[in-house]
Image (spheres, helix red, strand yellow):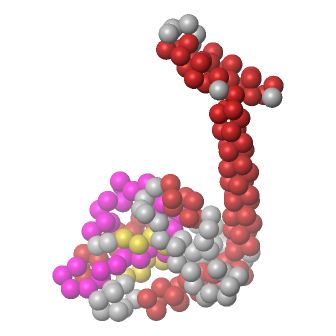
């Protein structure tokens, strides 16, 4: 999509977990969007997800939730102040937005542009892209190896026989695993 000329491409993940680790290897800027009141849950959130984020966006900064959103933003600002930062990386930002009041998105876009600009200037942008390409090449190689391995295992057919021997107490599980791996290596 970048090659197609889009200025901004937003990718949404399902939540705190493995998908975010994968998403960091797709994006130039990683944003963590949190709701009001989530600042108290910082201890429960995986440390890694907050370390990946370049921008923390606290949404629902409106109505009855406005003061809670402000407190959450303050909690995140306090938390990120403890992160070790190198001199050439952009500061992590905590921003407030409201879809209802249509506020904050201009600042989000400006912040994204500033971080990308600073990262390009200090070569962090190119380094991140290089790491991303390496990650995805490795992932694709893993996928191909796993696919080929699963195909060989299925064709070999010895797993069910060895599993039965383990169930019958004739061999230990590690012996079955060793037999399977040795058989695959010999093919």
Query: Magenta span covers which residues?
Result: 37-65
Residue 131 visible in the picture: no
* Residue 53 is inside the magenta segment: yes
Left or right of 53, for residue 58 = left
Residue at image location 51% in from the left, 8% down from the top: 169
Toward the left, the furthest residue is: 64
Q: Position of residue 103 (x, y in %)?
A: 36, 91
Left or right of 39, for residue 117 = right
Residue 89 visible in the picture: yes
Which residue is at the front of the view, 30 or 153?
153
Residue at image location 56% in from the left, 7% down from the top: 170
Q: Position of residue 115 (x, y in %)?
A: 60, 81
- The quadrant of the rendering that contains the N terminus is bottom right
Residue at image location 46% in from the left, 89% down from the top: 107
- Up/down of 110 relative to 180, above or below: below
Which residue is at the front of the view, 112 or 146?
146
Left or right of 183, for residue 52 = left
Toward the top, the furthest residue is: 170
* Residue 11 is inside the magenta segment: no
Which residue is at the front of the view, 27 or 118?
27
- Up/down of 30 relative to 102, above or below: above
Q: Position of residue 65 (x, y in %)?
A: 22, 79
Residue at image location 56% in from the left, 80% down from the top: 9
Which residue is at the front of the view, 155 or 24?
155
- The quadrant of the rendering that contains the C terminus is top right
Tally the numbered discs.
Answer: 0
Q: Position of residue 44 (x, y in %)?
A: 35, 54
Quarter of the rendering containing residue 105: bottom left
Quarter of the rendering containing residue 153: top right
């Amino acid at each position: 999509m970048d090659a197609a000329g889009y200025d901004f491409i937003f990718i949404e993940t399902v939540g705190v977990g493995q998908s975010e680790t994968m998403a960091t290897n797709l994006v130039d800027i990683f944003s963590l969007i949190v709701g009001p009141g989530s600042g108290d849950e910082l201890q429960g959130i995986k440390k890694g997800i907050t370390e990946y984020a370049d921008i923390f966006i606290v949404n629902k900064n409106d109505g009855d939730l406005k003061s809670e959103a402000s407190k959450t933003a303050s909690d995140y600002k306090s938390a990120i102040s403890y992160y070790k930062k190198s001199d050439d990386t952009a500061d992590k930002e905590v921003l407030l937005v409201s879809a209802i009041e249509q506020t904050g998105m201009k600042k989000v876009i400006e912040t994204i542009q500033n971080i990308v600009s600073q990262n390009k200037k200090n070569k962090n942008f190119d380094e991140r892209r290089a790491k991303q390409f390496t990650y995805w090449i490795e992932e694709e190689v893993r996928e191909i190896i796993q696919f080929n391995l699963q195909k060989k295992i299925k064709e070999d057919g010895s797993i069910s026989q060895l599993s039965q021997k383990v169930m019958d107490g004739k061999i230990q599980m590690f012996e079955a695993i060793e037999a399977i791996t040795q058989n695959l290596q010999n093919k």
